[in-house]
Amino acid sequence: MIKPILVAFLAVTAALSTNAYAQAPAPTSRSEATKIVADIRKVVADNGIERLEAVRIGGIDQWVSIRGNDPRNPVLLMLHGGPGWVAMPTSWYFQRGWEEYFTVVQWDQRGAGKTYAANDPALVAPTMTRERMIADTEEMVAWLRKEFGKDKVFVVGHSWGSYLGLELAQRRPEWLHAYVGIGQISNAPESERRGYVWTLQQAKAAGNAEAVAELEALAPYAQGNEPVPLEKLFKQRKWLNEYGGMVHNRTGGSAEAAAIRLSPEYTDDDLAKVWKANDFSTRHLLSEVLTLDMSRVHQLKTPLFLFLGRHDYNVSSELAAEWFTQVEAPAKQLVWFEQSAHELMIEEPGKTLLTLVQQVRPIAERAGDVP
């Protein structure tokens, strides 16, 4: 009798469970959808941290998200790309695993995301310079070291953020366990030239007459070290994205852009302004950055990691790998992500997590900066 009763019990339980799921209403608003995301990624550890707050950096309020299972874990600050392509509102997708091993800080930089929304753009505009952004980065790291009682932190720089991260690594190596570059900027003008050549090759191979005509009309493209006009840049990027140079086997960052709408950190007002902020940051910073040759950096005094997407033509991974062979550092490691282009933490989140935990975090372990 026991077995039939058990089978009947399980059948009833399954039916009730299925019925409960069937009756659960689909979210009908953004607030309902973001609450679901917030609930499922809640930090449930006994000593967990979930903070979303404005910090006074560089004379203005700048927003950070700070999340982790244990404040004794090493601090990891992510410097987002763009300029203005914020990582905080998509971190709900790729970051949750990191939070078990690091106290992860997402920061919306000056002129970007929540920080843009919290300040008067007219007052901020004159301060949108590379030197001010580097100074903000130094201030943010100094604040984190004091806030969490840490001598050193990890810094991960993605794309534009890799420029800020590399500058920080040169100026304040004593503050860093290591610097991790993702989509690392090296020789930016040469990166633009290689990206253009690759994109034109893809368009010709595909027989796309429209793309070929538009791209050939841009020639000469990125000659010398003069800034590329943004109009030319955006036309090149349209077709580079089309052929998977930004996200492997996808046409650009539309999925990432859509995922921003599900960010629990972002209010409706933040969301309404996020693309204005992206344009604001791009107009003030991008052209000049694309004239920089960071391959002039031949030595670092902090350990260096490069995470490079094999298919990244948005910021040439091939060129970054060439720079890596020349730079000297106390320790260095290059990790290729074979199924990624420029957004590898979203394209290969599992490998990103494993590499951070198995290769990067041990530096903090050896320094005693762990629970």
Image: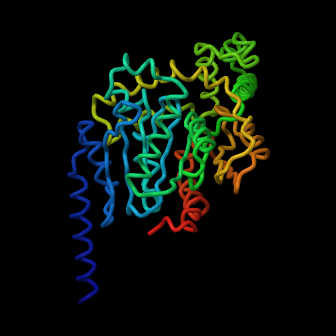
Q: Quadrant of the N terminus?
A: bottom left
Name the spot of residue 278 as percent of width and height, x first: 45, 25
**For this view, does 220 lie left or right of residue 67?**
right
Q: Quadrant of residue 117?
A: top left
Name the spot of residue 90 as percent of width and height, x first: 43, 41
Q: Is residue 67 above or below residue 314?
A: below
Name the spot of residue 338 as percent of width and height, x first: 67, 48
**For this view, does 24 lie left or right of residue 164?**
left
118 or 204: nearer the viewer: 118
The residue that appears at 56% across and 57% down in the rendered structure is 356
Q: Is residue 27 above or below residue 82?
A: below
90 or 29: nearer the viewer: 90
249 or 327: nearer the viewer: 327
**For this view, does 135 lie left or right of residue 264?**
right
Residue 188 seen? yes
**For this view, does 180 lie left or right of residue 83?**
right
Describe the colour scheme in one phrase: rainbow
Residue 97 seen? no
Name the spot of residue 353 as percent of width and height, x first: 53, 57
The number of callouts visible is 0
The residue that appears at 39% across and 36% down in the rendered structure is 57
Q: Quadrant of the C terminus?
A: bottom left
The residue that appears at 65% across and 35% down in the rendered structure is 185
**Residue with the most extreme bottom position:** 1
